[in-house]
Image (cartoon, coloured by chain):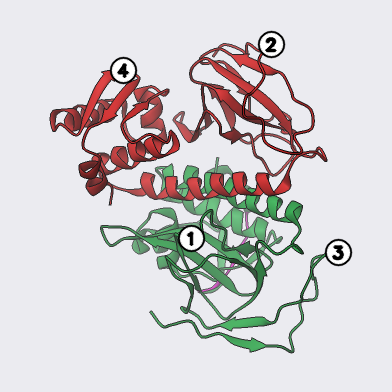
Chain colours: A red, B green
Amino acid sequence: MPAAAAHNHDAYRPTSASSAGAPHLRPVTFHAPESVIYAQGDDARLLYRIQYGAVRVSRLLADGRRQIVAFYLTGETFGFEIGAVHGFYAEAMVNTGLTAVERCSAGTLPHELVEIALRAMIRAQEHLLVVGRQSALEKIAVFLLDLAKRQECEAVIDLPMSRADIGDYLGLTIETVSRTISKLRAAGIIRLHSARSLEIVRPERLRMMSV
Amino acid sequence: MPAAAAHNHDAYRPTSASSAGAPHLRPVTFHAPESVIYAQGDDARLLYRIQYGAVRVSRLLADGRRQIVAFYLTGETFGFEIGAVHGFYAEAMVNTGLTAVERCSAGTLPHELVEIALRAMIRAQEHLLVVGRQSALEKIAVFLLDLAKRQECEAVIDLPMSRADIGDYLGLTIETVSRTISKLRAAGIIRLHSARSLEIVRPERLRMMSV
């Protein structure tokens, strides 16, 4: 795994800086695909907001498998921990720009953070329900609908994650992920624009599979 | 499922009311075992702090199975949602006393809520890792160690949940839960005081199984 490649891009300023109270506008740091943003055991003083790109948060299990516990997309905030150190590790999946937010700085907006932490919690519980399901079709359907919702787009969605990432998130093998996506395409429910871009042609069919 | 049985116990006052800022001391409501505290679709304006007892938060899946997404114990707070309604349902597992906290009241302490929401999120992600594991022994070992930690007790722990509850939390059948607990007992790692009370005799052995 390559080490983190972080360069300051001072010229970049986020256009949607969060309203009143954003204390110091921090520079955007750049992270190359597959670079580590933080590792297990690292200091957990900072939160990160994704200006562009996508991040996966994972844990390696004792048996060598990797469980991805969350994907974070543009506009989302990650890095929450209870204690002083990270219990999971975070990696950029594509070219990613982050701004850091200090958790304890007086300038952060607690109410905003509460909402973000709650969203992360509910998403983790929903994720649990999806992983617990038996059918790969159901899992993939829920996953794609969730991505579409978070990208605020009903039709064409970005897939910043690889098939292997999707497998390690949903508890499926890479072969099952690929086969299931092929099935959905053959049934005319989705259309692949590229390996990383996908159109939901018949969202109602997908929704029927997800319940 | 019996409906919620809530009575005010005005006489009861929590002894460890949370420091400065606790605005209105609310009465403790009583909930009988197996009674519903809130259902899916119910208004989600309130949070609940457990004065005594234990609560499970669940979702019924399309295939009829029940996934328990969280257990909450004495001193813990539950009921977090993003939207205006509950996406899960909550039930008392034993005799339970709750005090309600309004999320949006000016008197609540946002920083305290952030910590509680974060703890719930991290626990949900850890729960995901446990459910994703293959071995029933590993799952039960992690589960018992987590309970011991939350009850701040290394030896005798309360098990307010039934074997069926444990199964629906960990993704195991009730038979597997019972068989695994019997194995741990036969190996001298735990000792059962009653169906609902259990002593961890050799925590180091349990810890070895959980990693």
Separation of residues labelled 3 and 4 (CA atoms)? 54 Å
Q: Amino acid at mark 4?
A: Ala
The answer to the question of whether label 1 and label 3 lie on touching residues, with beta carbons closer than 8 A, is no
Closest to the camera, between mark 1 and mark 4, is 4
Quadrant location, the N terminus of chain B: bottom left
Local SS, label 4:
loop
Q: Is residue B167 visible?
A: no
Q: Residues within 10 Å of mark 2 (few under 14, many from 20)?
A: few
Kindly identify which residue carries mark 2.
A11
- Locate residue B138, reporting x and y percent: 48, 47
Local SS, label 1:
helix
Kindly identify which residue carries mark 3.
B20
Kindly identify which residue carries mark 1.
B186
Kindly identify which residue carries mark 4.
A195
For image coordinates 27% across by 57% down, the residue present is B62
Relative horizontal placement of residue A68, taking residue A189 as reference (left or right): right
Quadrant location, the C terminus of chain B: top right
Same-chain check, marks 1 and 4: no
Which label was assigned to residue B71?
A: none
Could you tell which of marks 1 and 3 lies nearer the N-terminus?
A: 3
Closest to the camera, between mark 2 and mark 1, is 2
Q: Amino acid at mark 2?
A: Ala
Magenta residues (range): B195-202
Relative horizontal placement of residue A69, taking residue A171 as reference (left or right): right
For image coordinates 51% across by 85% down, the residue present is B5
- Locate residue B107, reporting x and y percent: 77, 64
